[in-house]
Amino acid sequence: GEITDDEFRPFRLRRGVYGQRQPNVQMIRTKIPGGTLTARQMRVMADIADEYAGGRAHLTTRQNVQFHFVALGRVADLLHKLADVRMTTREACYNTVRNVTASPLAGLAADEAFDVTPYARQVALAFLHKELTDNLPRKFKIAFSGGGVRDYVATSIHDVGLTAVVRHENGVELRGFQVVIGGGLGPLPRGAQVLDEFLPVERLISRIEAIIRVFAKHGNRANK
């Protein structure tokens, strides 16, 4: 009771806790980079659904899992259960770098350039719980595609979309990404534009950080 509802709201949202229309209950959104989980993590989420959310969980379009109708007084215990299996809800909501998504066939598709799963996880961890990324002008979405005929993650509607590309120079295989930026849906949908035709994997984190810094400095904070 020491802070107002308006002060509590951004604190709560940064931790993946949404208020619901129904009084005194919350929606909790997990953050699952690339949609990849271990069996133990899946079992814990099933237990959480049974114990806190009436036996139900909601799968989202960003490869997250949400739990609804969780009493606010029980949220901390739920977050501890996730932390025990190295899962977090941090920045799954609010004006942050949201869950980093990847092709659901990463590592499996016959025509992919390479498995993007470790790169999606690398990016997710690089920008988790950072001052730069927890109060942006608007939510920021990143997606990885393995290349091939079909783009399973719709890179063109993301703030940063990355498609795996392999080049060969002097008999050496080089991994990298085509980088597109500035896509989005909402009231003014627009397709992303190509920034890099080939970005070496070694420059992945620094390139995305530069894009986020530009957005943080020049993005419109007055009008969502």
Image (spheres, rainbow, N blue to C red):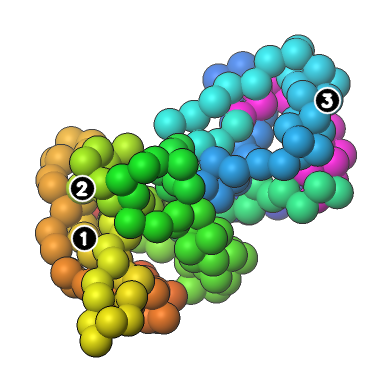
Q: Is residue 179 left or right of residue 42?
A: left
Instruction: State the image quarter where residue 24 is shown.
Output: top right
Amino acid on which disc 3 is placed: Asp
Closer to the chain start, of discs 2 and 3, is 3
Q: CA distance from mark 2 to mark 3?
A: 36 Å
Mark 3, residue position: 47
Instruction: State the image quarter where residue 104 is shown.
Output: top left
Q: Please, what secondary structure does the residue beneath circle 2 have? A: helix
Question: Which residue sits furthest bottom?
Answer: 170
Mark 1, residue position: 180
Q: How many marks?
A: 3
Tell me if mark 2 has few (under 14), some (14-19) or many (20+) residues whose alpha carbon lies within 10 angstroms of its own: many
> Does the residue at mark 2 contact the one at mark 1 (Cβ under 8 Å)?
yes
Q: Position of residue 216 (x, y in %)?
A: 35, 70
Q: Position of residue 182 (x, y in %)?
A: 20, 57
Q: CA distance from mark 2 to mark 1?
A: 7 Å
Q: Position of residue 123 (x, y in %)?
A: 49, 65
Closer to the chain start, of discs 1 and 3, is 3
Question: Residue placed at 66% from the left, 26% from the top?
Answer: 67
Q: Which segment did they paint magenta?
A: 66-83
> Does the residue at mark 2 contact the one at mark 3 (Cβ under 8 Å)?
no
Question: Residue placed at 26% from the left, 41% from the top?
Answer: 151
Mark 2, residue position: 156
